[in-house]
Image (cartoon, helix red, strand yellow):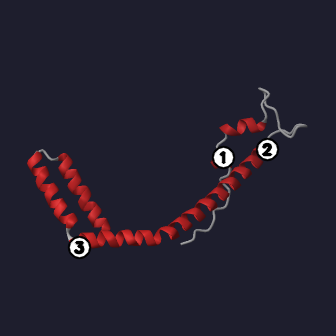
Amino acid sequence: MIKKALVLAAGVGGYVLGTRAGRGRYEQIKTQADKVWSSPTVQKVASDAQDLAAEKAPVVKEKATAAAHRATGTAKEAADQARSKVAEKAPSSDSGQAPSKDGQSTDDHLEGIDLVAAASDVPEEPKHG
């Protein structure tokens, strides 16, 4: 229901913005839109949608926060694995960091490495429905 209302509103908005009929047609459309919006049925649906959104907001926030924490953990894990692979391939030195030809350490060159490609063998977390 809400999806249909949004599509209808977008269609009306596009028509109003794109029409060449002028101010008169705009006023007609605006008057009709005001009548529809003021209708008790539309107001009830809008109120119900707002109540539902307020009711579900804490659940959505909790799920989004949990997903963000999982994504952060996975990203850190992938970065650590990529750094390990780079460190394994780099020649070792006494300081634990291999200097390159220009005197910079391996860590200084990590910026230019595609960590996503380097960590491509990181197993994906199982998706929860």
**Mark 2 and mark 3: Cα distance apart in space:** 65 Å
Give the quarter of the image for residue 36. Answer: bottom left
- Residue at (79%, 34%) from the top-left corner? 105
Q: Are marks 3 and 1 in contact (CB under 8 Å)?
A: no
* Amino acid marked by disc 3: Thr
Where does the image place residue 20, in percent across and percent down from the top left?
A: 12, 44
Q: Nearer the viewer, residue 64 or 71?
A: 64
User: Dot 3: few (<14), some (14–19), or many (≥20) neighbours within 10 Å?
Assistant: few
List x then y, in percent, for residue 39. Answer: 20, 69
Query: Mark 3 or 1, which is nearer the eye?
Result: 3
Q: Please say if 110 is above or below 126.
A: above
Q: Farthest right residue? A: 94
Q: Is residue 86 above or below residue 1?
A: above
Marks 3 and 1, how far apart in space? Answer: 54 Å
Comes first in the chain, label 3 or label 1: 3
12 or 104, nearer to the observer = 12
Name the residue carrying label 1: 115
The furthest residue to the top: 102
* First of labels 2, 3 by sequence position: 3
Q: Is residue 6 left or right of residue 107?
A: left
Say how many tags the image has.
Answer: 3
Q: Residue at x 8, y 49 (%)?
A: 24
Q: Residues within 10 Å of mark 2 (few under 14, many from 20)?
A: some
**Residue 129 seen:** yes
Residue type at the position of mark 2: Ala
Q: Secondary structure at mark 2?
A: helix
- Mark toward the start of the polypeptide (2 vs 1): 2
Q: Amino acid at mark 1?
A: Leu
Q: Residues within 10 Å of mark 1 (few under 14, many from 20)?
A: some
| Residue at image mark 3 | 41
**Would you name the residue on which mark 2 appears?**
87
